[in-house]
Image: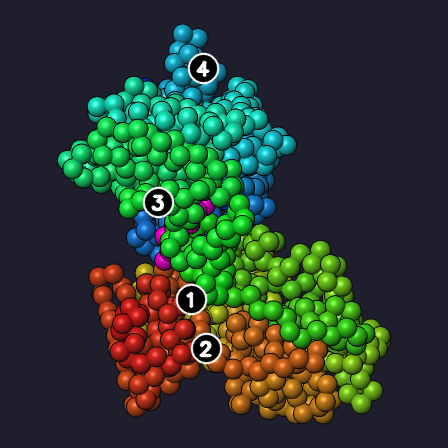
């Protein structure tokens, strides 16, 4: 089975399913279907878009093989959405492509974990995000609910191609695969299948179709590649415009109500007709009545979707709601139909369960329920007919925003809102009712779709995507109590995490002061933990830099890049640049970080140091962006790379070089890996996992001499006597704070610049934060600590108060086929520590949490690191062993 080249270096590699007759239970598919997957080959990277249904994986692989693709060289697997007919084979493809990163919306990546049941590298994307494949660019658009909440489109501008997953497709298996090749005598059935597919799949989400249209209407599109059915090569805009036409609501000049019902003996039908008369008596309201068993379900749902109100009627037979109404309501959802005015009614004999069952479903649909419904025993009497008429009047008034007059008997008490936590307060002299909530109103964010809602408790069901209450997290919005407006001059040396967040905190509290950030680097602030990723490739700007250029302009923060500070005059409150320029300050923040330590190893006729290692070709450290780029360029001609130091950064660098194609060895002085992050048992498992990574790990040894030839690294000799060929050598043996500048200025230093919890130094108006700062004998030296220290330094410098406290050091490592999480400051040799652990050797999963005086102080996770948030939170709270077990950490 061969692939199909759709455009240059863009291939269809999907699967045919011509015999399929029922799709996802709900759709009849007389023409079968296709599962479309695409491969895009760039000059530097390869991306695969979606996969196929799991049972067609062998057919899928045959098509991929026809492209002569080495699965190990697949860089990205783009998941347009996670419906299993598209994402069902992602886990299998990841087994063949272990270095591939899964690209999708944040919601898609969350969902995929439940489908793949494994960990994977991922990149979350949304509107405005892009990934470069070299000569091709993937621009992503967020288009939720087409027809899952996690859907994205991908536009490839160089090919004028839009990859749309389920949008603009159809269940129509045609081996020609292009819409212009469909024979004329088959065009009608193709268009019928396209409309039927739209009605069932996209029809419930018409507002979202229109939102997507607005995002793509100005794009250059010559080709649309959907997830099912023929590729739109001929006039794709014809289908796009049809989607717009089908989704655009009919403009109505009056309100509309739909009343679907079933009736066994005509009694419920009589109620429906009378309720309709009551509704129409209030205002010029269009009322559509449907006896469900005599009408097409699709027509009824379309009318419900276009209506302002809907009433469902059913008799009760054998204590049950009748099936046609139950089926109809099952096809509605809170995303589209939530918020509509709704009510229930029906006739009954000896019991009346149908009406409360309808109300239960209306509550699930988040509709605005009128009353408790209307039940009539057997055939309506004259009084009952009046009751039905009044029920219609009250419903119409509620829908129009008026206060309905109560109808008040034991089975027919009304409520304005179905949320029982609300208190309904009626003003007898007013036509309207006021609804007051009790308790504190909070903000709740749905972690699936990102919407934020105000309520006392998390919503039972997200009205946007239907997620349950357990998928909400509280959003804390702190009011900015402190505010200053003066023209103080703030100078920040260093633009890493600490410097950036110090500046951000200052500006949030003082909109008028002067802020200058001085950096020796030529680049604006970026995510330093991603620096090693630059060794094997590139990182999109929006994922690499902390802020866009516009942010600095909008916040009036001046960046002076490529500026080296050579002196600090604390008495005069000035800093001197290497260029000779002097800059005065009122408050100074030192955030100029650290440098990588170089072991004093013999190298030719000299001994290596931080000052001279660059004099020898082939020796590097990886501290900043320029270092990583230099290593990447060196790998173009280097064959044998060695990393001295088996810590987190050293192993990450080794992995990226391995991914780039180099032969890599790691030399670690200690007899085991990650002794600061893992206990002995965890380290052994980690070593077992990494043994299959393709990287040679040498433990309990160290570099004795670097052998130089023509001022280039040729090999290294270890203390054990072993000689390793080497033309690229990376030192990763720890950091040292940049203390020489502050030391010369009379600022107190030890391992770092000494600070208190406010980040204040011994010199008034001088603060320090990040890798340069030493607090109570500790140089934290990690990104999260730098962020928090920067915030504290900026807050105190501007005149507010803040302390660096309750910080939990934590690291996550994801390389060498392993995932590791470690948190807390743990001395694994401390015999007084207690621990709880779990281990699964088959799944390579290891969990261990540590306690001192029955309080959680640290934790280690290998393989499954899903409990990392719980561990950090537990350390901050000092939870007990019993609480940790009850919290499900293990």
Distance between mark 2 and mark 3 Cα atoms: 59 Å
Q: Position of residue 736 (x, y in %)?
A: 57, 81
Q: Specify whether 157 is left or right of 457.
A: right
Query: Helix, strand, or loop for circle 4?
Result: helix
Distance between mark 1 and mark 3 Cα atoms: 65 Å
Q: Which mark is residue 181?
A: 4
Bounds of the magenta span?
A: 462-471
- Tell me which numbered mark, 3 or 4, is placed earlier along the sequence: 4
Label 3: which residue?
Answer: 408
Distance between mark 4 and mark 2 Cα atoms: 62 Å
Contact (Cβ within 8 Å) of mark 2 with mark 3: no
Label 2: which residue?
Answer: 808
Q: Is residue 234 above or below residue 129?
A: above
As rendered, which of 792 and 354 lies closer to the eye? 354
Contact (Cβ within 8 Å) of mark 1 with mark 3: no
As rendered, which of 143 and 518 lies closer to the eye? 143
- Tell me which numbered mark, 4 or 2, is placed earlier along the sequence: 4
- Tell me which numbered mark, 2 or 1, is placed earlier along the sequence: 2
Contact (Cβ within 8 Å) of mark 2 with mark 1: no
Q: Which mark is residue 862?
A: none
- Tell me which numbered mark, 1 or 4, is placed earlier along the sequence: 4
Q: Which mark is residue 813?
A: 1
Q: Position of residue 306 (x, y in %)?
A: 47, 30
Contact (Cβ within 8 Å) of mark 1 with mark 4: no
Which mark is in front, 3 or 4? Answer: 3
Q: Position of residue 633 (x, y in %)?
A: 58, 57
Query: For residue 469: magenta?
Result: yes
Residue at screen point 52% across, 47% down: 432
Residue situated furthest front in the rendering: 382
- Looking at the rendered image, the quarter that the N terminus falls into is top left
């Amino acid at each position: 089975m061969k692939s199909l080249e759709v455009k240059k270096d863009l291939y269809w590699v999907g699967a045919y399913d011509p015999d399929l007759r029922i799709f996802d239970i709900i759709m009849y598919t007389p023409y079968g279907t296709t599962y479309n997957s695409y491969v895009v080959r760039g000059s530097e990277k390869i991306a695969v878009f979606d996969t196929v249904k799991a049972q067609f994986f062998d057919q899928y692989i045959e098509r991929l093989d026809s492209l002569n693709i080495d699965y190990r060289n697949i860089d990205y697997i783009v998941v347009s959405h996670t419906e299993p007919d598209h994402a069902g084979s992602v886990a299998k493809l990841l087994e063949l492509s272990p270095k591939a990163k899964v690209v999708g919306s944040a919601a898609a990546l969350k969902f995929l974990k439940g489908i793949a049941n494994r960990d994977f590298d991922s990149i979350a994307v949304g509107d405005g995000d892009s990934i470069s494949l070299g000569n091709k660019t993937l621009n992503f658009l967020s288009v939720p609910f087409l027809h899952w909440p996690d859907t994205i489109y991908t536009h490839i501008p160089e090919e004028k191609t839009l990859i749309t997953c389920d949008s603009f497709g159809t269940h129509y298996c045609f081996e020609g695969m292009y819409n212009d090749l469909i024979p004329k005598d088959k065009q009608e059935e193709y268009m019928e299948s396209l409309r039927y597919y739209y009605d069932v799949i996209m029809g419930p989400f018409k507002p979202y179709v229109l939102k997507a249209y607005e995002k793509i209407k100005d794009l250059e599109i010559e080709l649309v590649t959907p997830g099912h059915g023929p590729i739109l090569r001929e006039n794709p805009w014809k289908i796009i415009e049809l989607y717009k036409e089908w989704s655009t609501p009919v403009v109505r000049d009056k309100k509309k109500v739909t009343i679907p019902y079933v009736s066994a003996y005509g009694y419920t039908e009589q109620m429906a007709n009378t309720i309709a008369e009551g509704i129409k008596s209030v205002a010029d309201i269009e009322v559509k009545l449907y006896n469900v068993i005599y009408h097409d379900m699709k027509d009824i749902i379309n009318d419900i979707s276009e209506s302002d109100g809907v009433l469902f009627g059913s008799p009760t037979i054998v204590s049950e709601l009748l099936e046609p109404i139950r089926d109809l309501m099952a096809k509605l959802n809170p995303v589209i139909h939530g918020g509509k005015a709704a009510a229930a009614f029906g006739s009954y004999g000896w019991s009346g369960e149908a009406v409360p069952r309808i109300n239960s479903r209306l509550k699930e649909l988040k509709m605005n329920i009128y009353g408790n419904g209307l039940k009539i025993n057997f055939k309506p009497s004259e009084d009952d007919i009046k009751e039905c008429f009044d029920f219609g009047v009250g419903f119409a008034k509620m829908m129009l925003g008026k206060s309905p007059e109560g109808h008040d008997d034991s089975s027919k008490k009304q409520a304005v809102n179905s949320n029982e936590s609300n208190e309904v307060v009626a003003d007898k002299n007013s036509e309207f009712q006021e609804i007051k909530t009790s308790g504190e109103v909070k903000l709740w964010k749905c972690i699936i779709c990102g919407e934020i809602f105000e309520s006392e408790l998390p919503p039972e069901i997200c009205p946007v995507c239907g997620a349950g209450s357990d998928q909400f997290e509280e959003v804390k919005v702190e009011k900015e109590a402190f505010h200053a407006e003066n023209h103080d001059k703030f100078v920040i040396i260093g633009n890493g995490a600490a410097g950036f967040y110090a500046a951000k905190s200052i500006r949030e509290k003082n909109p008028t002061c002067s802020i200058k950030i001085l950096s020796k680097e030529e680049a604006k602030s970026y995510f330093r933990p991603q620096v090693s990723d630059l060794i094997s490739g590139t990182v999109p700007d929006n994922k690499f830099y902390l802020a866009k250029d516009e942010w600095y302009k909008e916040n009036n923060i001046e960046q002076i890049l490529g500026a080296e500070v050579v002196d600090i005059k604390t008495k005069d409150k000035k800093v001197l640049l290497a260029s000779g320029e002097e800059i005065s300050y009122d408050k100074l923040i030192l955030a100029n970080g650290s440098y990588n330590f170089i072991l004093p190893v013999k190298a030719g006729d000299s001994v290596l140091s931080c000052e001279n290692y660059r004099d020898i070709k082939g020796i590097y450290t990886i501290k900043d962006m320029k270092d990583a780029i230099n290593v990447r360029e060196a790998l173009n001609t280097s064959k044998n790379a060695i990393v001295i130091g088996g810590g987190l950064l050293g192993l990450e660098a080794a992995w990226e070089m391995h991914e780039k194609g180099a032969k890599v060895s790691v030399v670690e002085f200690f007899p085991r890996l990650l002794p600061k992050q893992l206990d002995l048992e965890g380290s052994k498992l980690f070593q077992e996992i990494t043994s299959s990574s393709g990287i040679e790990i040498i433990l309990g040894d160290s570099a004795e001499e670097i052998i130089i030839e023509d001022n280039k690294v040729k090999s290294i000799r270890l203390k054990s006597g072993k000689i390793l060929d080497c033309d690229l050598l990376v030192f990763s043996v720890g950091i040292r704070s940049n203390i020489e500048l502050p030391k010369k200025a009379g600022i107190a230093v030890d391992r770092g610049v000494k600070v208190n919890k406010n980040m204040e130094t011994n010199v008034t108006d001088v603060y320090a934060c990040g890798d340069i700062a030493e607090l109570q004998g500790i140089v934290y030296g990690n990104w999260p600590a730098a962020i928090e220290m920067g915030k504290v330094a900026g807050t105190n410098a501007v005149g507010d108060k803040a302390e660096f406290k309750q910080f939990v050091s934590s690291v996550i490592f994801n390389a060498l086929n392993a995932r590791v999480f470690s948190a807390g400051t743990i001395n694994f040799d401390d015999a007084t520590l207690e621990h709880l652990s779990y281990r699964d050797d088959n799944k390579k999963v290891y969990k261990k949490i540590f306690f001192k005086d029955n309080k959680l102080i640290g934790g280690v996770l290998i393989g499954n690191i899903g409990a990392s948030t719980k561990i950090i939170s537990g350390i901050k709270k000092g939870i007990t062993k019993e609480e940790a077990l009850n919290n499900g950490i293990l």
